[in-house]
Image: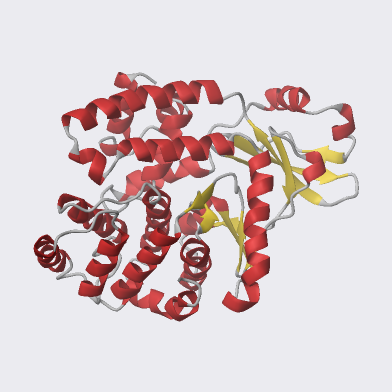
């Protein structure tokens, strides 16, 4: 993807109604990942654009059936095949880097087989370097862009998550990390409604992953059908919020295509990317969100300041505080359709940076998660007053945030 192709991608996302998904996919894996990032930005993109981009979560182009057998043969041997009664050639689902096929083990258990479609790594790295050069040029011309949005840090996050996703052994390892946290804390914080599909380590490798088949729907499917229960979505906020704020280790790509729902139980899938956040940042963000839930805006401003790596002089902080209060003067009791939490958070960080604050790069994985969650609420229940709804989770989380 050269510079022209990158700007053409931005044109597809921001100006074409709806964007041409086939064209986006032809731009390569980086283009798909950028499209996925914007799929939930219904706060500033038209709903029809977000609906179209959300197809990139699970309905990207699959390999033709005649290529499936050749691809599988290149990754496994005859002993591996003997472990199965059958494997469907037609993919059940296809995402940006892999596709999933139903199968049955020789013992009869229904499973799914996930395959990496092709060798993406080299072309993806080239595209990242091209876009990185462009971003370095932009930030040299406009230095504040690096402080506020830091596109290079965002690109590095996409790069790290995607390269991790290309090696399916990361999913084995990372799912175990999340399961260990679940096992250690499930009674204390009520994680009973979270499960993980069984993974078959002995049948999995860098390019192939065998997992238990869960007879449920992705949140993306339920959102498309307009039948996702808001109570189930709040349950996701509680569970994912515990991992983010309580532990600081969490599913790094929890978009609605990576969560299955069955009988009001959540299943985290595609755990190839793990997000980590420092204690300082997670505790600071929790305090910020806690004060925000109760519309304590001076408390929010102080929490943001404590997160900063740079302490402001008293006079400068007072100037910041007055502008902060003005930014939030109309925030109380607003629904998610009236005020986007993602947009408000970005404005807040921008305000802090412009007044001299500085934040560690670990902020981006959390913002990405909040963006996904905020976008799901907007699609599920646009009349929700999210800050009030989150109050019920504060006492449970507070015991872990220290």
- Rendered image coloring scheme: secondary structure
**Residue sitting nearer the eye, 48 or 32:** 32
Q: Give the x, y percent position of residue 153.
A: 36, 39
Image-based side of 228 in relation to 355, left or right: right
Drawn side of residue 167 relative to residue 329, left or right: right
**Which residue shows up at 47% across the image and 40% down it?**
56
- For residue 115, what is the image quadrant? top right
Quarter holding the N terminus is top left
Which quadrant of the figure has residue 170?
A: top right
Q: Is residue 394 above or below residue 348?
A: below
Q: Quadrant of the C terminus?
A: bottom left
Residue in the foreground of this view, choosing between 325 and 93: 325
User: Could you tell me which residue is drawn at 67 percent across and 61 percent down?
Assistant: 180
The image shows residue 377 at horizontal and vertical percentages of 39, 63
Whether residue 153 is visible, yes or no, is yes
Image check: 291 left or right of 119? left
| Horizontal arrangement in the rendering, residue 51 relative to residue 345 (left or right) | right
Q: Position of residue 273 (x, y in %)?
A: 55, 45
Residue found at x 32% / y 52% = 42
Count of all numbered marks drawn on residues in the image: 0
Q: Say if 59 sits above or below 383 in the image.
A: above
Task: Depth check: give the residue in front, 75 or 107.
Answer: 75
Residue 101's spot in the image, x, y percent?
Answer: 70, 40
Whether residue 216 is visible to the viewer of this picture, yes or no, is no
Q: From this view, report whether residue 175 is shown above or below residue 202.
A: below
């Amino acid at each position: 993807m050269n510079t022209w192709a990158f700007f053409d991608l931005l044109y597809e996302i921001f100006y074409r109604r709806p964007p041409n998904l086939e064209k986006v996919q032809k731009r390569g894996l980086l283009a798909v990942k950028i499209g996925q990032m914007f799929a939930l930005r219904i706060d500033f993109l038209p709903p029809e654009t977000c609906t179209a981009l959300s197809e990139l979560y699970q309905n990207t182009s699959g390999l033709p059936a005649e290529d499936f057998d050749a691809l599988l043969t290149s990754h496994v041997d005859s002993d591996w095949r003997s472990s199965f009664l059958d494997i469907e050639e037609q993919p059940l689902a296809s995402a940006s880097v892999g596709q999933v096929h139903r199968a049955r083990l020789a013992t009869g258990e229904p499973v799914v087989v996930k395959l990496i479609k092709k060798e993406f790594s080299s072309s993806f790295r080239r595209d990242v370097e091209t876009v990185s050069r462009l971003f370095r040029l932009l930030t040299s011309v406009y230095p504040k862009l690096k402080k506020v949005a830091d596109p290079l840090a965002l690109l590095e996050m996409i790069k790290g998550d995607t390269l991790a996703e290309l090696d399916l052994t990361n999913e084995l390892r990372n799912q175990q990390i999340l399961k260990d946290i679940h096992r250690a804390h499930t009674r204390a914080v009520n994680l009973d409604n979270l499960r993980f599909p069984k993974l078959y380590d002995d049948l999995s490798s860098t390019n192939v992953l065998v997992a238990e088949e869960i007879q449920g729907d992705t949140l993306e499917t339920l959102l498309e059908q307009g039948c996702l229960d808001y109570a189930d979505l709040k349950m996701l906020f509680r569970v994912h919020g515990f991992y983010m704020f309580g532990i600081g280790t969490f599913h790094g790509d929890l978009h609605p295509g990576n969560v299955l729902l069955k009988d009001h139980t959540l299943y985290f899938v595609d755990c190839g990317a793990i997000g980590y956040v420092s204690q300082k940042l997670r505790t600071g963000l929790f305090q910020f969100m806690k004060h925000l839930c109760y519309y304590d805006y001076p408390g929010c401003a102080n929490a943001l300041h404590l997160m900063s790596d740079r302490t402001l002089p008293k006079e400068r902080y007072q100037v910041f505080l007055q502008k902060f209060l003005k930014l939030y003067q109309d925030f109380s009791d607003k629904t998610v359709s009236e005020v986007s939490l993602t947009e408000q958070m970005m404005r807040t960080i921008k305000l802090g940076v412009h007044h001299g604050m500085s934040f560690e790069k670990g902020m981006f994985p959390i913002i990405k998660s909040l963006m996904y969650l905020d976008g799901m609420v907007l699609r599920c229940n646009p009349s929700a007053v999210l800050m009030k709804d989150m109050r019920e989770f504060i006492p449970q989380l507070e015991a872990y945030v220290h």
